[in-house]
Image (cartoon, rainbow, N blue to C red):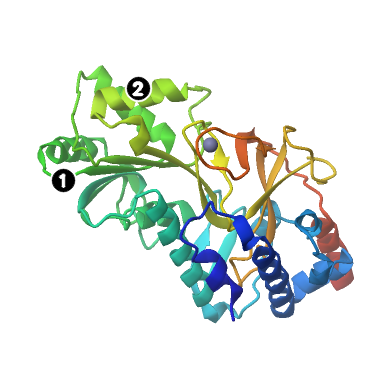
């Protein structure tokens, strides 16, 4: 039996309880199947002297050779033939420095089921039709960007009456759609249906600020909602206070603080993390978070800043079992006070590390030399 069925279909994503042994076994099997399907991954494991059976406890998860997202930008690591990939996505970035990830049918199935459970928990999935403002790109044939797909996917959680995009597809590129957004928003405000905003915090802030400057104060329907993903650091040097931001949202759109959700996610780690009311990203039972030293990549103690890395057995078409991002974060096991009892992480920023050297990268270098 595929253990992912048991793990990713749990109703409460934060009740880790007795799922720990299941998680470890799913990780062992995930590494083994990726190793069998991807010769490059097999060589990486071999070069690091690692076998899935080396995982006896939670602490051993940190020993799994970790694949940097930077490595995925330069290498294609697939464990199934490319024709078996049901969907492909790329990270944002200039051409040549994008990660390409691909999911086979089973990874996609469990990923969608997990998201369904996860978003149901937050009551984000709803049968009531809504009008969407997407503060991002309109999907088009000429882009595979994960962020575009995520934003579009987010508009599937409640039936869409209409979608208006801040960046509209012109057929060959994108144009900023300020007038369209304004018009849509004013007409949505008169509609009996709720409105959902999906996109980057920076754009949301810009929109709310523009409304205030124009003296516009709307009272959108009660079930309206804001779904934000991506960094806060995209404001050209402008770091805004979160509380001030939510006050601005309430003032201009009439949407309460608890109806604003902030997510963390990465193309190379297709899970979602939601910020709790105290501003922390709690870890669901689908994954584990390890913070690593920026130089040695060894795990650092709780409370210490390091690189954010994840372990999850979700994906069977690529060795994404243990990945490290270039985001800086801090991990904590302390009581949060929000009601969720799982550990959490706080994002600190981006490392901008270009030379993360792991056992994996070193192995790749060695492989490169051997192949010449
Ligand atoms: Zn919390």
**Residue in front for this viewpoint, 307 or 51:** 51
Query: From what the image shows, is residue 38 above or below residue 251?
Result: below
- Mark 2 sits on what residue? 247
Residue drawn at (67%, 37%) of the image: 332
Give the residue at mark 1.
Answer: 193
The residue at the point 47 percent across, 22 percent down is 240
**Residue 165 showing in the rendered view:** yes
Quadrant housing residue 330:
top right
Q: Nearer the viewer, residue 340 or 67?
A: 340
Location of the C terminus by quadrant is bottom right
**Residue 201 quadrant:** top left
State which quadrant residue 7 falls in.
bottom right
Q: Residue at x 70, y 74 (%)?
A: 29
Residue 116 screen position, x and y as percent: 41, 61
Image spot of residue 244 (x, y percent): 40, 20
Q: Is residue 79 above or below residue 60?
A: below
Residue 266 is labelled as none
Nearer-N-terminus badge (1/2): 1
Q: Residues within 10 Å of mark 2 (few under 14, many from 20)?
A: some
The N terminus lies in quadrant: bottom right
Spatial CA span between label 1 and label 2: 23 Å
Q: Residues within 10 Å of mark 1 (few under 14, many from 20)?
A: some
372 left or right of 254 in image: right
């Amino acid at each position: 039996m595929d253990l992912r069925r048991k793990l990713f279909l749990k109703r409460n994503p934060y009740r880790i309880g007795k799922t720990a042994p299941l998680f470890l076994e799913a990780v062992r099997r995930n590494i083994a199947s990726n190793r069998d399907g991807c010769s490059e991954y097999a060589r990486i494991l071999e070069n690091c002297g690692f076998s899935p059976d080396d995982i006896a406890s939670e602490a051993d998860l940190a020993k799994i050779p970790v694949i940097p997202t930077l490595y995925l930008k330069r290498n294609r690591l697939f464990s199934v033939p490319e024709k078996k990939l049901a969907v492909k996505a790329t990270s944002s970035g200039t051409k040549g420095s994008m990660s390409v990830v691909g999911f086979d049918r089973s990874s996609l199935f469990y990923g969608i089921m997990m998201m369904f459970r996860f978003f149901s928990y937050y009551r984000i999935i709803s049968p009531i039709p809504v009008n969407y403002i997407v503060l991002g790109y309109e999907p088009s044939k000429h882009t595979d960007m994960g962020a575009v797909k995520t934003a579009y996917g987010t508009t599937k959680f409640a039936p869409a009456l209409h979608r208006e995009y801040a960046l509209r597809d012109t057929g060959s590129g994108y144009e900023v759609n300020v007038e369209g957004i304004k018009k849509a928003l004013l007409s949505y405000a008169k509609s009996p249906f709720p409105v959902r905003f999906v996109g980057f915090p920076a754009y949301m802030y810009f929109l709310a600020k523009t409304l205030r400057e124009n003296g516009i104060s709307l009272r959108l329907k009660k079930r309206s909602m804001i779904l934000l993903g991506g960094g806060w650091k995209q404001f050209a040097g402008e770091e805004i206070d979160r509380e001030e931001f939510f006050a601005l949202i309430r003032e201009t759109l009439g949407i309460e603080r608890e109806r604003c959700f902030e997510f963390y996610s990465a193309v190379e780690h297709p899970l979602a993390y939601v910020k709790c009311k105290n501003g922390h990203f709690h870890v669901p039972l689908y994954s584990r978070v390890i913070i690593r030293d920026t130089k040695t990549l060894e795990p650092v103690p709780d409370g210490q800043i390091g690189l954010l890395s994840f372990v999850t057995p979700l994906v069977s078409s690529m060795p994404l079992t243990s990945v490290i991002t270039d985001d800086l974060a801090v991990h904590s096991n302390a009581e949060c006070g929000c009601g969720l009892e799982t550990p959490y992480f706080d994002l600190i920023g981006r490392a901008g590390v270009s030379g993360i050297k792991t056992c994996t990268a070193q192995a790749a270098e060695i492989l490169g030399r051997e192949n010449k």
